[in-house]
Image (cartoon, grey):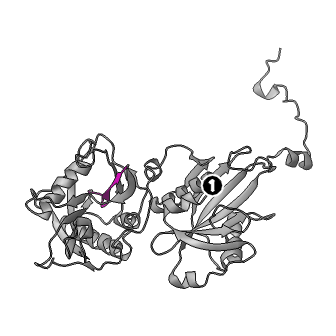
Amino acid sequence: MNTPTHGDAAAEPEQPKTSQEEYARSRHAVWLGAAALMTDELGRVLLVKPTYRRQWLLPGGGAEPGEGPGQVFRREVHEELGLLRTPGEVLAVNWVAPGHPDVAADLPFPGEVRYVLDGGTLTEQDIEALRLPADELHGYEFLDSRAAAERMIPVDAQLMLAALRARLSGTTAHLDGGRHVGAVPPLDLHEVHTRPRDGRDWPWHPDRVPDRLPVPQAWGWLFAPDGRVVLVIDPADPLAMLPGGTVEATDTSPEAALVREAVEEAQLTLAPGRVERLGWVHDATGDVYGGIGECARLRLAAPITGVGPSTIDPASGRRFARLLAAPEQAAALLGWGDQGYQQAAQSARLAHERWGIPLAVPSPITEIPAEGIGW
């Protein structure tokens, strides 16, 4: 008697063959679109106003047969703006399903995969070279992120904001119907916006404050051991800020004010005796401080030795989010223009040379846990 072996097992029944045409018909056909996220040197987003709709858009459009996202980017940027531009990183991808509420109900819409690619920063020369097709676009404008979102339909605004925040954080956003797939990144979770700040054109002075100028304000570039700095986000106005604030009458010095504010706003413990002055910004009027006249807005730097559990800020009655970003990323979020980048570079050099803190390179921005961190 022969015992069957695995090799003697009956052969699997042959599967019915499908023709190439039948296979092709079985595939899910969807639209493909791509847009460019471009900003000016102040970080404002470029939007264009179509002649055929009320809402504003990122430059871009739908793919023609055989085109991929990069080809759509190149063609649309050239056709709409008159620029020859190489696409950068993929910043965001969004799946818009059939029946989405922001798509016209009478449009036969099979669903669309929309890409946003990084178009970089446009210089003044780039902007002067912009040429728009009059039959397709009414005009263009550079807008801060909140103003840009208000001019777009919700699904387009969600994609634009996710792409901008991904660029700032060095990541890529994956969206389904405008919502993040998986964990929501910190900038999106706290709905952080960007805008050019008042005083961005004021000169930065990396030296001693003149004796004649009062110092009503002290903000700090405060360094974690890995070289990143802390940013705080007020939920009432979600813009990135350095820890710090007004120098109160009870503060013995601007340095003491920063130590106090770091605890109150972000529960940060600063290394004793290591709070150092970086420089100052000249405020010619002091209007925000009651019209005190000329004054110096001081910037300092210090290493952090620990972060306590998140608490309510006593001055505002709100709980601030606490984010960690490379100094260069912090400068982009702060909206101070060139002087912000100068402060970021100077503070990073000081921290490296004085305290041995490494020079951080841009990486995904993270949130400090609610329970705090010990170093």
Q: In the rendered structure, which amino acid carries the disc numbered 1?
A: Ile
The number of numbered badges drawn on the structure is: 1
Above or below: residue 138 compared with residue 174: below
* Residue 172 as seen in the image, left or right of residue 260: right
Residue beneath disc 1: 153
The x, y position of residue 360, in whole percent, is 34, 64
- The structure residue drawn at horizontal position 85% and vertical position 29%, both measured from the top left corner, is 11
Residue numbers of the magenta segment? 225-235
Dot 1, how many residues are within 10 Å of its Cα: few (below 14), some (14-19), or many (20+)? some
* Residue 258 as seen in the image, left or right of residue 79: left
Q: Nearer the viewer, residue 267 or 271?
A: 267
* Residue 194 as seen in the image, left or right of residue 78: left
Q: Is residue 270 visible?
A: no
The x, y position of residue 287, in whole percent, is 26, 69
Q: Nearer the viewer, residue 108 or 216?
A: 216
Q: Is residue 15 visible?
A: yes
The x, y position of residue 134, in whole percent, is 72, 77
Q: Quadrant of residue 208?
A: bottom left
- The structure residue drawn at horizontal position 35% and vertical position 51%, both measured from the top left corner, is 234
